[in-house]
Amino acid sequence: MPYIVKKNILKKVLKPRFKESHKYDFGYLLVIGGSKLYSGSPALASLAALRTGVDLVLTIAPQRAADIIASFSPNLIAYSLSGSDLEKKHLPELLSLTESAKKVSRDNAAFLIGGGLGRDDGAKESVIEYLLKVDIPGVIDADGIWAVANKKEILKKKPFILTPHSYEFYIFSGKDVSEMSLEEKIKTVEKTARDFETTILLKGNPDIITNGKETFLNETGCPEMTVGGTGDTLAGICGTLLAQKINPLEAACGASFINGKAGEFAKKKYGISLLATDLIEEIPNVLK
């Protein structure tokens, strides 16, 4: 029987802060995404991550996307990769940046990959090769899920969170959950998580969060969150919690609750005009 995520999840996932705290004690997150067409996704994820309390976010994107992201906010550090899309030639650079993040943060590092990358072969192969080589926790979102659908075995026993909506879950698993009852959907997501030994956060009403052994339902959120970008904010929040050494299942539960509740707060102000950027501004009110 699934558990319901309650607000006490915040006490589990929000680490106490002491006077002696230093930069990187609360995480270093690498956000890898963007392409010649998409720049908003990694920017939204990065801003949501910062609002959730990570100490530093490095947003890594192809040149055009990185240049646009850098202009959004002085809080964002955008690292530019050559060219207009992610390619396998970028892998040594990505791995070097990852090792650097691990070193300076004293292993308080995590990654988020997939948002806005596109689905061409070069991007997919790059995602797979990166995931094969990294040894830090990470969130796989959006186009990253399309990539790992071709090599699911790389997920096994790694501290990853997949954050699909129902169609991305279909691409990954081959199971169409869109017309299933909630009970059937829960069983299907549990089995998929169990088969591939990973944590899945299936976005929906409610969100289903499971590692195949334990399952939680998150009921926060609102219909206005169908607007583009709210999945990116969710992934960014997940990334912050992983970078703070919260285990994947609790991180996914906490992120789901925070993102949904922030959406509810934003709805009170904006109604159907809610934007993902409005949700980000409500994260501090949820954390209070």
Image (spheres, grey):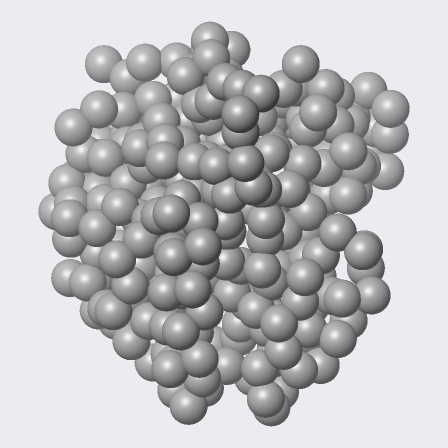
Q: Where's the C terminus, which quadrant?
A: top right
Q: Position of residue 19 (x, y in %)?
A: 58, 20
> Image point 58% across, 60% down: which residue?
58
Q: Is residue 22 left or right of residue 68?
A: left
Answer yes or no: is residue 149 visible.
Answer: no
Which image quadrant is residue 260 in?
top right
Answer yes or no: is residue 215 visible.
Answer: yes
> Image point 73% across, 43% down: which residue?
276
Q: Which residue is nearer to you in this view: 228 or 57?
A: 57
> Image point 34% across, 22% down: which residue?
216
Q: Where's the N terminus, which quadrant?
A: top left
Q: Position of residue 282 (x, y in %)?
A: 74, 27
Q: Which residue is nearer to you in this view: 234 or 82?
A: 82
Q: Position of residue 3 (x, y in %)?
A: 32, 13
Which image quadrant is residue 52 in?
top right
Which image quadrant is residue 123 in?
bottom left
Q: How many marks?
A: 0
Q: Position of residue 170 (x, y in %)?
A: 34, 55
Q: Is residue 81 left or right of residue 169?
A: right
Q: Which residue is nearer to you in this view: 184 or 148?
A: 148
> Image point 82% across, 65% down: which residue?
71
**In the picture shown, does residue 57 fall above or below 114?**
above
